[in-house]
Amino acid sequence: MVKTIEKADVVIVPVQIAYFFENGKQKWLYNFIDGANRANKIVWVYTAGDFGITLNADVYTFRLGGFDSKLGKKTFIVPSLIIDPYQTLNLKFLPIAKSSLPSIGFVGHANGSITKWAKEFSIFLYHNLTRMTKHVFEDYQPFYPSSIKRYRFLTALQKNNKIETNFIFRKKYRAGVITEVEKVKSTFEFFENIYDNPYVFCLRGAGNFSVRLYETLAMGRIPVVIDTDIRLPLDDIIDWKNHCIIAKENDFEDQLIDFHSTINEKDFEKMQVNNRNLWLASLNREGYFSSIHTLFKEIIK
């Protein structure tokens, strides 16, 4: 930490940038960034929340998600910085042996009712109204009813006789739990399901990212990720195809079946070990920012 911009290698805006928009301080923010740019310094900003804000400025932006085709090269995806599940569960990581059919798990919010669709569309309209009237400040996102989509994809998997499924459908987010006892029980069911299945279905939520992806990797399992124009963290360093099945909406079943039929028993277990090690090395809080530090040492040179 240094006291002047001139002595810095990187200049960091230390609060998430929505604060400046919400409090009428955009001018201060842009003046601060311009001052650092004039001094030829790298500027880091962080935009929080499901949607985030894109600045029209020369900065490196850290955010949880967004659309890869719309994000510039100076945008870095931050993984959801979860606590290691094995620290809170009475379980020890072990890879699962390969079985004849792929076994895929899921516990979570998946609801295919018309009522749910109407509710999600109402929320979408409300968000757009608050964004247009400047009551909230966030990037626009098209309508994507994630719980409806999730339900449709999961029921398609259940009907496929070449795939074994282990699903628990929740009609509400986090099962609508209220008490601490209910929260502990639902959390254990969630992680126990990941632990028991080598593959885990991962689809975006309100924002274009999946927290479940990082929970799956942390537990050393294989995410089946639906590609919704996502950008994953550290994609210049991590070859994500070695850690996930990344598939389009129209072929994820075939991708899962083909992948499982071609991977051998040894590589199947090794992939699970590698996923656990990837999370430990690069996707928890310390590991991620250590990787970012290494990346920016090269940029600064």
Image: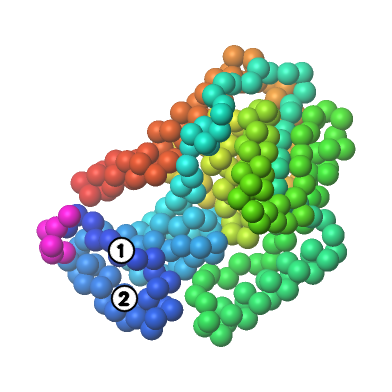
Residue name at image x 45 percent, y 57 percent: 63
Please state the horizontal and vertical placement of residue 158, each as a whole percent of the image.
84, 38
Helix, strand or loop at mark 1: loop
Q: Residue at x 68, y 38 (%)?
A: 189
In this view, 120 is above or below 208: below
Identified by mark 2, the residue type is Tyr
Give x and y (percent) for residue 143: 69, 66
Residue 230 located within the stretch drawn in magenta:
no
Q: Which residue is mark 2?
A: 30
Residue 59 shows in the view: no
Q: CA distance from mark 2 to mark 1?
A: 14 Å
Determine which of the numbered discs, if any, sits on residue 14 in the image: 1
Q: Is residue 217 above or below residue 264?
A: below
Q: Is residue 60 visible?
A: yes
Nearer to us in this view, 139 or 258: 139
The amino acid sitting under disc 1 is: Pro
Give how far across and how far down residue 106 sits, in percent: 71, 40
Frontmost residue, 109 versus 56: 109
Quarter-wise, where is residue 54 in the image? bottom left
Which quadrant of the figure has residue 61?
bottom left
* Mark found first going from the N terminus, 2 or 1: 1
Specify the segment rendered in magenta.
1-7
